[in-house]
Image (tube, rainbow, N blue to C red):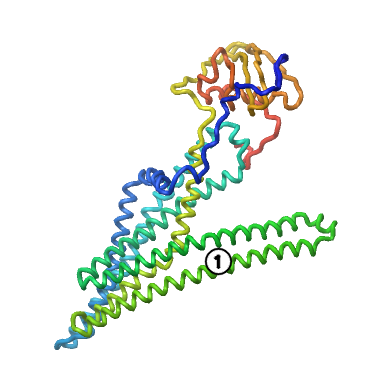
Amino acid sequence: MRHPGGTTTSDPFATAQVTVPATVAESRSDWPTLKRLFPYLWQYKWRVLLAMGFMVGAKLANVGVPLLLKDLVDTMNPKGGINAQALLVVPLGLLVAYGLLRLSSTVLTELRELVFSKATEGASRAISLQVFGHLHALSLRFHLERQTGGVSRDIERGTRAMRSLISYSLYNILPTLIEVVVVLSLLAVKFDGWFAGIAITALVLYIGFTIAITEWRTHFIKQMNELESVAQSHAIDALLNYETVKYFNNEAFEAQRYDTSLQRYRSAAIKSQTSLSLLNTGQQLIIAVGLVAMLWRATQGVVDGRMTLGDLVMVNAFMIQLYIPLGFLGVLYRSIKQSLVELEKMFALLDRRCEVADVPGAPALDLVPSSRKGEGAASVRFDHVSFAYDPDRAILHDISFDIPAGKTVAVVGPSGSGKSTLARLLYRFYDVQRGRILLNGQDISQVTQASVRAVIGIVPQDTVLFNDTVEY
């Protein structure tokens, strides 16, 4: 709507336009993202600490298994004279202890899952609710410019990424690090420094190789996923427009387009699989060389009499126990990086500044209802109001009018003249660039938005239905 004397030229009052925040790629690195995640988990600090205790216990039990295997093998290979009864009783006791250690490791792991699940789901609920509430606090401008599907995907992927990040870091990486430290300490204490040195060298090479190759092959994975989406889009477009394809006799052409996209996807998939094979081969080569070096050193110790046959078995069991979880390191590294990216996108929604916000300490709108007609109703006044959605096109310019309490007023004008804008400004979906809007003599920018909207009723032009019951 325009004032009778107004124009449609651009106006300097439009300086209140909001700058969109920086993109996710520019906003933060990985570490600040992780730091923002900690407070949500720390609400359940006792559960987190208890789960960590169970995790440490499970790993200590897991490390104890090779130690029992060593004692079991040494007992079955006696060097002195031991009677048959003792030879039978001792291994039986060790076997029972071996089984109990295995069982305790599993039980402690499940207890960790049970205790920590409430913390994980609680943190997920808290952050989802915070994002949801923040999105409702953003101005109408954001919601008109956004892609609903994109925002909902960012929230869904962000909450899923938080669960994945916690699972990968606390359930996979941290337990493996604890086990590595304990095993290396045992090797250094029980045997000479060569064993710990070989193990550390193999681990460093393994981790470095895995991260380097994973970073390199990420490009092929992204390309493969993009080309798969292109192929699916071609197929869906052709099937959705089945009638049009028939009209133009283009079945063969659409099939050729689909086949071309499939060929491109096939080429990218082969590159991805080749790089994965290279990763797996390199990992197994490092593991094999490390194991051979460790066992060669242990075999020398057995021959020289410095080590027992049980020590050889224990060293082998330790190394296999360490390298099995490391086999998933490439997948874990890529998944963690992806989870961090998705979590950053969700945090970027929280970082969006509210264009329309209550002033600090804003009171509620003072509107006393009355049973007598016309009394207690709110008068409406637009006082020299100017507003523009875009700086180059003023919608309202120096508009002034009064609506007395209890009166009916019709606003008439062509499409795009600003009729809906008046309602949006009255609801304070946007702040005016100039002038004031008064309800019952009170500037709506100085009272809470909730109190303003609570006293206004509207019948929207479009019928809006929620996917819920009529009672909703």
Camera-side residue of 218 and 462: 218
**Residue found 39% across the figure and 60% down from its top:** 172
With respect to residue 203, does 77 lie above or below?
below
Please give the count of numbered marks on the rendered protein.
Answer: 1
Q: Is residue 382 above or below residue 135?
A: above
| Image quarter of the C terminus | top right
Give the residue drawn at x 50%, y 46%: 25
Q: Residue 231, image x and y in percent? A: 67, 60
Question: Where residue 203 sits: x, y (%)?
Answer: 35, 67
- Decide which of 372, 353 is in the foreground and name it: 353
Q: Which residue is mark 1?
A: 272
Q: Quadrant of the N terminus?
A: top right
Q: Amino acid at mark 1?
A: Ser
Residue 145 in the image, given as x and y percentages of width and height:
62, 37
Picture quadrant where residue 200 is located: bottom left
Q: Nearer the viewer, residue 459 or 277?
A: 277
Q: Secondary structure at mark 1?
A: helix
Q: Residues within 10 Å of mark 1 (few under 14, many from 20)?
A: many
Q: Quadrant of residue 385?
A: top right
Foreground residue among 79 and 94: 79
Identify the residue at horizontal 54%, vertical 60% (top origin).
219
Residue 348 horizontal side relative to residue 198, left or right: right
